[in-house]
Image: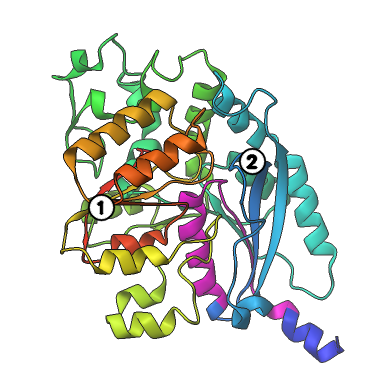
Amino acid sequence: MAIDELKVSCRRPHIVAVAYLTQGHINPLIHFCLKLAHHGILVTFVTIHVDGLLGVGQRKDPEVPEHWKNNFNFERLELELPKEGVMSPGGFAKIFAMIEELGGPFEELLSKLHSREEIPKVSCIVSDCMLVFTQVVAKKLGIPRAGFWTTSLASLTVDYHVPLLLENGDIPVTGKNIRENWEKIITYVPGLAPLPAWSLPIMYHEGNIMTTTDPGYKRKIARCVILRDDAWIIANSFEKLEPAGFQALRKAMNQRCVGVGPLLPDEFFGERGDYDEHRKVVAPGVASFWKQDTTCLEWLAGKAPNSVLYISFGSVIKLTLPEFEELSRGLESSKQAFLWAFRPGCVEGLEIEDLESFKERTSSTGLVISWAPQVEVLSHESTGGFLTHCG
């Protein structure tokens, strides 16, 4: 690279983006980063890879349109799957704990990037708010960090005000039956509509997923407190959807909260003709872990408006065999039209013959595929409902 080119390169902003390891967290962040790359900003997109977590067929890295590759690089932080697997007792908790040990490897990665003369120094870290270690490293190295929030601003408001909820004794939510807290209404959280205590996120319920002595609970509380150290919080929401929440959080954070959502491919904001043309350039499946079966769109086109139930339980969650049997029995007996994104290995202990038998018995009403172009399916006029997990 010539000296003049090097000087120009080093004046470019360089964002290091770090995504949480599941597809629902990666998708909005990568669409945000593609918008940055479109404006000439260099993006190093860091994924956390847990070998074997997502089963067979998982892609190594998301795909990026060819014309943006000069502004987009990928790096990975590697973890090993616990020997006993994710679905064993405490399996997910162990992965969460392992993720927080990635501070050292992340610092090494930043040092490696800084040592490369052909690219600009790192200007800013944009990382999922779930990843506390990124804020710790950013603070140590003096690099500004913006926390990226993938879900509603209401959920961010709850997490941001965890110290207030602790002070008032409303978390952890106690009682063998959370409905015992039915009449307890929380009204004092700025920007949050009144809500019953039992409806707080389940990770704040004692004895449900974790207890106050559980390291996972302590990590969750620590993550909420460290939100206040972020230079900015970037939320996948928008002002007109949650005006009170934005107003309250901006006041609490000295204006350091901004909404950039909804983060979807640009073509979904245009006419259908625009979408069909633009998807040739920017594939909606840019961050898909598995190859998407687009033939389902032809199947949907033959269904009545709002008639199809779309089913997907995400990229990690697995069903037990009894859960699958109950769900499949319900679909079969109801004769409800359905499209099921049934990723490889998503049901523990299911024999392939049993799956094929179910597909054959429901072939007149349903379609089972390995992975769907989800945004396209959800925006299709034939889709009338969405059955999924709750995060």
Neighbourhood count class around disc 1 (C-alpha, 10 Å): few under 14, some 14–19, many 20 upward: few
Q: Quadrant of the N terminus?
A: bottom right
Neighbourhood count class around disc 2 (C-alpha, 10 Å): few under 14, some 14–19, many 20 upward: many
Q: Position of residue 275 (x, y in %)?
A: 36, 80
Q: Image check: 280 left or right of 326?
A: right
Give the magenta range. Answer: 10-37
Disc 1 is placed on an element classified as loop
Q: CA distance from mark 2 to mark 1?
A: 50 Å
Q: Mark 1 sits on what residue? A: 364
Disc 2 is placed on an element classified as helix
Q: Position of residue 231 (x, y in %)?
A: 52, 54
Question: Residue lying furthest left in this view?
Answer: 183
Is-magenta flag for residue 189?
no
Is-magenta flag for residue 31?
yes
Q: Residue at x 34, y 73 (%)?
A: 268
Type of the residue with mark 1? Ser
Q: Looking at the image, which is closer to me, 36 or 382?
A: 382
Visible residue check, residue 317: no
Q: Image check: 2 left or right of 43?
A: right
Visible residue check, residue 313: yes
Query: Is residue 364 placed above or below 156 in the rendered structure?
Result: below
Q: Looking at the image, which is closer to me, 248 or 317?
A: 317
Q: Residue at x 33, y 37 (%)?
A: 158
Query: Is residue 132 placed above or below 19 in the rendered structure?
Result: above
| Foreground tag (2 vs 1) | 1
Q: Residue at x 46, y 18 (%)?
A: 210
Type of the residue with mark 2? Phe
Query: Is residue 381 placed above or below 271 in the rendered structure?
Result: above
- Would you identify the image quadrant in which residue 13 lies? bottom right
Q: Mark 2 sits on what residue? A: 133
Q: Contact (CB < 8 A) between labels 2 and 1?
A: no
